Amino acid sequence: MEFLPIFMNLRGRQGLIVGGGEVAARKAVLLEQAGASLRVVSPALISPLQEMQREGRIDYRQGEFEEGDLDGVALVIAATDNAAVNRQVSELANARQLPVNVVDNPQLCSFIVPSIIDRSPVQIAVSTGGSSPVLARLLRARLEAAIPAAYGRLATLVESFRDRVKARFDNVNARRKFWEDVLQGRIAEMVFSGHQKDAEQALEESLAQADTGPAGEVYLIGGGPGDPDLLTFRALRLMQQADVIVHDRLISKEVLELTRRDAHRIYVGKERDNHSVPQDQINQLLVDLAKEGKRVCRLKGGDPFVFGRGGEEIETLTANGVNFQVVPGITAALGSSAYAGIPLTHRDFSQSVVFVTGHLKDGSMNLNWKGLAQPQQTIVFYMGLKGLPVICEKLMEHGLPADLPIALVQQATTPRQRVFTGTLGDMPERIASEEIKPPTLIIVGNVVKLHDKLNWFRSEAMIARGE
Ligand code: SAH
């Protein structure tokens, strides 16, 4: 993070603007909106600034910038067209530890001014750290469009009820849930459609009827294979509501970052053969947290109901009377298939697809090999890396040809994705010298032939290798 975004209270404090041109005039208006009193220093002023001076809105000193102009000010903006003056302002202000901004010169700035979406009292500031003001403006335009102008009125309504809501709920979680219902439901819509009075009335009623007890709940959420863009809207919304996040190893850092910043995160591990927290303890943890009134996001890789033991977790919840929701995610087979350009079915190659676990137990796999080794069928193995030699051997033993294509997809959909292809006959040997990182998925069948043609995704690793 190059700059820390903060919101500064300038009410009644003095801001200095060095310069009298158009940019200076824009900054003057901005500082004035923030309630600052303004000093402007410049040999000349363009007419909007002259007007501000006539109206007594700025304190103007005609002349070149001098060090004494910095006395008593809280913030400085240099907006002259003279690089040497701008640099001098920056150096002198820095020597006094005064926040200083030099227009269009991030190197000389101790603060930068973001693009602002103003829904006072709601303010959204967008910055690209000075790297692209145009991009910041484009983002701002998108946000302007997405955030109704009435958000300001909504915030004002919330403010006026804040103390009473606080007094009514002594449980923080119940209070937060109350506000979320207000801000996302009927009452917010009333404000947006201009029915302020009705909204106030409805808020009164909700407050009177609200259930003030703890309202714990568990959201069993599929976090997908890694790329955060593959989350569902519902997953994202609930991830941002939850008070506690219980996650395991398969959840990518990028996905985890989309959970609420102040949520408590609990890592429950889960590695092959080595569950850092045993499943029954995870089940119990979810029950206990929900009973404390927490909204718990149980975040699992891929889809919670595909080799995810999600079923067991919610069985325990039902047995304990805890409310829950299940949000599907993109399972690894679908993420790998899409991002490796390997369609799982195809009219010419495969009419069915099966998902199986290739988890090795005591050196073998208890699978219906005969059923798997069918012509025109794609087989996807989860957790199959260790068992790869056994998989290849068993499939050939049950009649699949040694030249049948097979693919191994490492860390699908992430910047670290790699795809290895070979045949049942040579794959174990081919990858023996490779350093393959989990998680990986195995796809067996003639559809793998399509990879060379349909492989569209360029991961960062591939770009770095010049592929
Ligand atoms: N519930 C998960 C699967 C959990 S089992 C889902 O629906 O995807 C764990 C196995 O999933 C791993 O051993 C690996 O085979 C597969 N897997 C999960 N994420 C993956 C990814 N990003 N790339 C490749 N395989 C992945």
Image (spheres, rainbow, N blue to C red):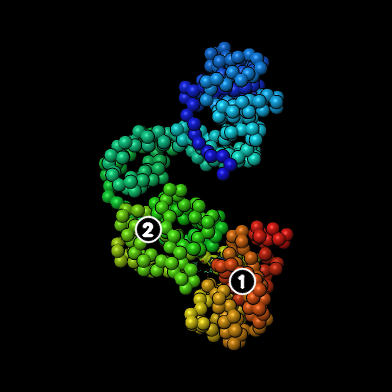
Q: Which of marks 1 and 2 is nearer the N terminus?
A: 2
Q: Residue at x 41, y 45 (%)?
A: 184
Residue shown at 30% from the left, 47% from the top? 171
Query: Which disc, if any, is residue 408?
Result: 1
Q: Can residue 233 be seen in this view?
A: no
Image location (x, y in percent) of residue 453: 70, 67
Q: Dot 1, how many residues are within 10 Å of its Cα: few (below 14), some (14-19), or many (20+)?
A: many
Classify 392 as above or below 434.
below
Residue 341 visible from this viewpoint:
yes
* Residue pictured at 44% horizontal, 69% vertical: 275
Q: What element carries label 2?
A: strand
Relative placement, left or right, of 77 versus 221 is: right
- 344, 37: nearer the viewer: 37
Q: Do the residues labelled 1 and 2 touch (CB within 8 Å)?
A: no
Q: How far apart are marks 1 and 2 (CA)?
A: 34 Å
Disc 2: which residue: 218
Q: Say left or right for 200 vs 52.
A: left
